[in-house]
Amino acid sequence: MINIFQKIPAGVILLAGVFLFNTCSSSKLPIWLNPVQRNDSEFIHGFSKISKTGKPEDYIGQARSYSLGTIAQAIKMDIDATSVNKVKEIERKGSKNIFSIENSYEMIYSARTTLSLEGIEHIGEWEDEDYYCVYNRLSKSVYKDNLNRKISKALETSSNNLHEGIRHLYVNPVTSLKYF
């Protein structure tokens, strides 16, 4: 006669194993792997898909860098387009000092690119046998808020330096130069 209680633990273990195998082996693809899901106009999207060659830390680092680089490049293109329009307007008005315009443009560009990478949202990372994928995004409203906050702070600092420089101009003109 077969004792049913001896068969139950083996059956439970078998069912648990089958369930565990099915849940682990059927790795669903994240929804963000589909390019259609990454076209929300409220965000600047950064996606990278890197071939898994070499050491894991190398291709993972490269995928993360490329994802962030995609966002930085999108911001750079936005700044380039805005800056070119401003330079053309100044040139039409008769400005001949193009060097100083390009110089100030470069300073603005590097400052904006640095500050604009604040607020990036890391959506996820995924890999299969051949590729490693990373998806980040930056809300355009968060980007603009950060940019406006930094501009306001820079304007306040510039104004304070100007007033301090003018105050020192009459007392010690040499000392006042560090504020201008």
Image (cartoon, rainbow, N blue to C red):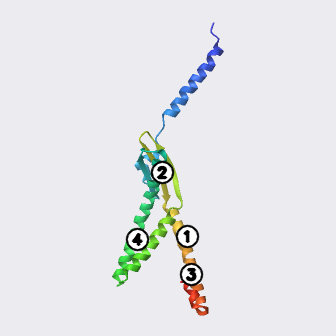
Q: Between marks 1 and 4, how big is the CA–CA gap?
A: 19 Å
Dot 2 and dot 3 residues touching (CB under 8 Å): no
Q: Which residue lies under the disc numbered 4?
A: 82
> Which numbered disc, 2 or 1, marks the residue that appears first in the sequence?
2
Q: Which residue lies under the disc numbered 3?
A: 159
Q: Residue at x 58, y 26 (%)?
A: 16
> Which numbered disc, 1 or 4, marks the residue that appears first in the sequence?
4
Q: Which residue lies under the disc numbered 1?
A: 149
| Local secondary structure at mark 2 | helix
Amino acid at pointer 1 = Arg
Depth order, front residue of 176/133: 176
Quadrant hosting residue 164? bottom right
> Which numbered disc, 4 or 3, marks the residue that appears first in the sequence?
4
> Which numbered disc, 4 or 2, marks the residue that appears first in the sequence?
2
Viewer-side label of 2, 3: 2
As drawn, the label of residue 61 is 2
Q: Between marks 1 and 3, how big is the CA–CA gap?
A: 15 Å
